[in-house]
Image: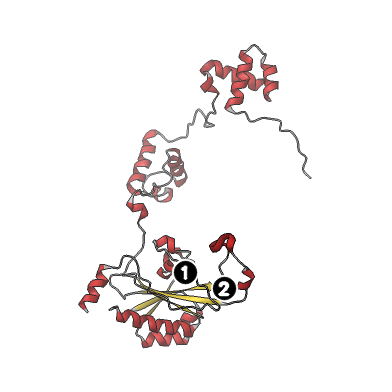
């Protein structure tokens, strides 16, 4: 058990220092003013001398930087580092190859002048999403799945205080939302299926390619995650029969995140899509056919390609 003791030294604020100085100015000895303010007699004398030299502003908190720094870089070298930083936007390690100073010294100079972090882009550049885009529709198709829990009645997050018995939603099962999005046009196709096994993924791929072909888009290759269903023999045979090239994302790489996650409710805000599902009331609610999911701003190149066909 730790012993609780009164701290020997008190951290004085600007108001506490002014109060001690005011007491001394009223005619009280510094020793008595220090006892009443909770500090030592030497501290009271030091505060009184600071007040006599610079007034009330001299009692403010001062920087802990030493008055003399003989090993600090001169102003010309610091301006050289800052100029290289503005021109190249490099960090201390890369700037060490441009200026004759080590990265540690460059980092201290950047922090001293408030340039250790690059400024954020303002205006439309800050709101613009940084993403790649293929040259033509059908060149790359993103596939993804989302596991959704089934329920008889929504909980308090949807109904609030009017929520009924959440125990009715136990052991009902799961459904899987399969999503396909064209990389260039962002034209999306989705189905709600009971599973995400190899057979379900293959049947979804066949229906998705047929749906895109009906809209004038010929799929060339597909991008999926490294799940077992996308490495199965059935998936390999289906992609070979449809003449599709297979591409897989790298694990634990945020920059390789698939566009299929854009239609998921938890990631819809990042791409500007508002995903809402209507609440159905019935004795035995079932998954109905989902409406066609199309991006709000279809690509002009897709419309021109469909018109040409």
Q: Residue furthest top?
A: 27
Quadrant in which the N terminus appears: top right
Quadrant in which the C terminus appears: bottom left
- Residue 231, percent from left and from top: 47, 81
- Marks 2 & 1, CB-CB < 8 Å contact: no
**How is the structure coloured here?**
secondary structure
Residue at the image point whose x is 39% and y is 84% from the top: 206
Residue at the image point whose x is 62% and y is 68% from the top: 166
Which quarter of the figure has residue 292? bottom left
Position of residue 46 relative to residue 271, above or below, is above
Residue 287 left/right relative to 297: right
- SS of the residue under disc 1: loop
Residue at the image point whose x is 76% and y is 38% from the top: 4
- Crowdedness near tag 1: few (<14), some (14–19) or many (≥20) residues, C-alpha within 10 Å: few
Position of residue 261 relative to residue 120, above or below, is below
Q: Is residue 75 visible?
A: yes
- SS of the residue under disc 2: loop
- Residue 214, percent from left and from top: 30, 81
Residue 224 left/right relative to 64: left
For residue 278, which numbered disc appears in the image? 1
Position of residue 263 relative to residue 87, above or below, is below
**Which badge, 2 or 1, is on the more N-terminal residue?**
2
- Label 2 to label 1, Cα distance in Å? 13 Å
Of 22 and 276, which appears nearest the observer? 276
- Residue 266, percent from left and from top: 48, 64
For residue 152, which numbered disc appears in the image? 2
Q: Is residue 226 visible?
A: no
For residue 120, which numbered disc appears in the image? none
- Residue 103, percent from left and from top: 45, 47
Residue at the image point whose x is 44% and y is 71% from the top: 249
Residue 9 left/right relative to 63: right
């Amino acid at each position: 058990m730790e012993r609780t003791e009164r701290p020997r030294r008190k951290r004085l604020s600007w108001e506490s220092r002014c109060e001690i100085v005011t007491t001394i100015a009223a005619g009280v000895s510094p020793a008595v003013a220090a006892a009443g303010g909770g500090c030592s007699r030497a501290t009271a004398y030091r505060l009184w001398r600071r007040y006599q030299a610079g007034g009330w502003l001299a009692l403010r908190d001062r920087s802990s930087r030493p008055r003399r720094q003989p090993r600090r870089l001169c102003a010309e070298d610091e301006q050289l580092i800052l100029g290289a930083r503005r021109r190249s936007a490099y960090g201390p390690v890369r700037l060490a190859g441009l200026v004759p100073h080590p990265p540690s010294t460059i980092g201290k100079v950047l922090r001293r002048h408030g340039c250790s972090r690059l400024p954020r882009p303002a205006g439309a550049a800050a709101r613009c999403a940084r993403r790649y885009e293929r040259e033509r529709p059908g060149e790359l198709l993103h596939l993804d799945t989302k596991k959704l829990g089934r329920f008889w009645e929504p909980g308090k997050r949807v109904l609030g205080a009017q929520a009924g018995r959440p125990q009715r939603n136990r052991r009902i099962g799961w459904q899987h939302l399969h999503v396909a999005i064209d990389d260039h046009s962002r034209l999306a196709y989705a189905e709600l299926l009971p599973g995400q096994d190899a057979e379900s993924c293959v049947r979804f791929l066949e229906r998705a390619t047929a749906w895109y072909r009906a809209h004038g888009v010929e799929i060339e290759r597909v991008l999926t995650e490294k799940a077992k269903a996308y490495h199965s023999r059935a998936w390999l045979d289906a992609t070979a029969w449809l003449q599709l090239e297979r591409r897989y994302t790298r694990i634990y790489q945020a920059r390789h995140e698939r566009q299929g996650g854009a239609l998921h409710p938890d990631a819809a805000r990042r791409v500007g899509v508002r995903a809402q599902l209507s609440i159905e009331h019935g004795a035995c609610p079932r998954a109905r056919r989902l409406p066609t999911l199309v991006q709000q701003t279809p690509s002009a190149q897709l419309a021109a390609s469909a018109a040409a066909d």
